[in-house]
Image: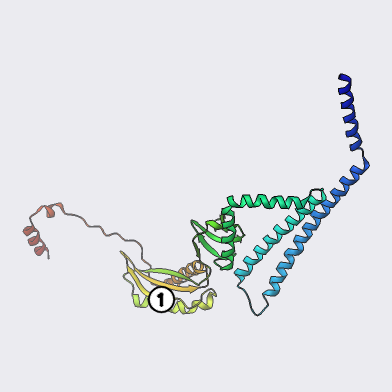
Amino acid sequence: MAATTTDDVKKTVDETVDKIIDNDLWVMLGTNAIKIIAIMLITYIALKLGRTAIRNVFRVRSKAPLKFSERREATLLKLLENVLTYVVYFISLMTILSTLGIDIKGLIAGAGIVGLAIGFGAQNLVRDIITGFFIIFEDQFSVGDYVRVGSAEGTVEEIGLRTTKIKSWTGELHIFPNGNITEVTNFSIHNSIAVVDVSIAYEENIDEAEKVIQDLLVTLPQKYEDLVNPPELLGVQTLGASDVVIRIVAETVPMRHWYIARMMRKDVKAVLDKHGIEIPFPRMVMYSRNEDFHAQPYHDKKRLGQEEG
């Protein structure tokens, strides 16, 4: 019994060694390795050429009489590059599996059945893809737009079939499944409005201050190309505790209202200083209370007041 077991082990070892030193095996492994490396190299080249071709198509398309907006072109460019990547990687994977001797037809058929079963539980994934399609089709927002989605606000970095990436101005990258995007505020479609409030001291001549500001506003479109129209002086907005607030509004190209508002405040401050018009500072008036005076009856207070007058 022991001899039989020893013979079996020896036979197994001999067969294994024969297989390992078999020239045909090493030739097959080397051939397959070379094929896989070639497939990976072709995949890399195909992705490079495909992305270059897509960019060239959009570059030529931009010179055509019928044009898309730059926002929409950037979005479609990103989307087509993503689709190209998925397709090329899938074909590459199937080719590698076929090179290794795996029956990809049976694999694809089995994957179809498994995919059908998974599909019933992957409703969120399907919803994300459908929502992403309608976001792009309806041009709700595009790459480069400044949007607000829920509590996140920033620039759209990428719109994919499943997720959307939004980068805030402080650097955080927010990634949303498309199906979770129910409300979007897009700040990049229409022109923006810059609002600037200027405080003038009560002692100053308001008409003169408005004239000085108005003369400045007329010159600003020549200075700032982001202005769509000359800024408008609306007039006195509020009467504060120590100041008169004058409001200025200006229409700018999308998302440039913050910059224009900062520049307008600087220019208004400079021109008011030049004409000697004071911007007020907080003031406090203090009254000294006379305890003896308040302790007297009302008719005595009135008499004392008349005598002092």
Quarter location, residue 7: top right
Residue lying furthest right? 23
| Vertical arrangement, residue 117 with respect to residue 269, above or below | above
Residue in the foreground of this view, choosing between 187 and 65: 65
Q: Residue at x 49, y 66 (%)?
A: 258
- Quadrant of the image containing the N terminus: top right
Looking at the picture, how far across and down is residue 2, in whole percent?
86, 19
Work out whether residue 63 or residue 249 is closer to the camera in this orientation and state it: 63
> Would you say residue 164 is visible in this rendering?
no
What colouring method underlies this structural image?
rainbow
Q: Which residue reaches farthest top?
A: 2
Residue 118: percent from left, percent from top: 62, 50
Q: Callout 1: few (<14), some (14-19), or many (20+) C-alpha neighbours within 10 Å?
A: some
Task: Name the residue tied to disc 1.
Answer: 233
Question: Is 217 above or below relative to 4?
Answer: below
Residue 14, placed above or below residue 241:
above
Q: Residue at x 77, y 64 (%)?
A: 49
Q: Helix, strand or loop at disc 1?
A: strand
Residue at 43 percent across and 69 percent down: it is 196
Residue 279 falls in image quadrant: bottom left
Quadrant of the rendered structure where residue 300 is?
bottom left
Foreground pick, 147 / 279 = 147
Q: Is residue 151 left or right of residue 50?
A: left
- On the picture, is 125 further left or further right than 37? left
Q: In the image, what residue occupies the spot 48% across and 74% down?
A: 251
Residue 39 in view in this figure: yes
- 84 vs 12, left or right, is left
Could you say where residue 23 lies in the image, as x and y percent from the top left? 93, 42
**Amino acid type at image mark 1:** Leu
| x then y, percent, for residue 74 | 63, 67
Q: Is residue 128 placed above or below 65 in the rendered structure?
A: above
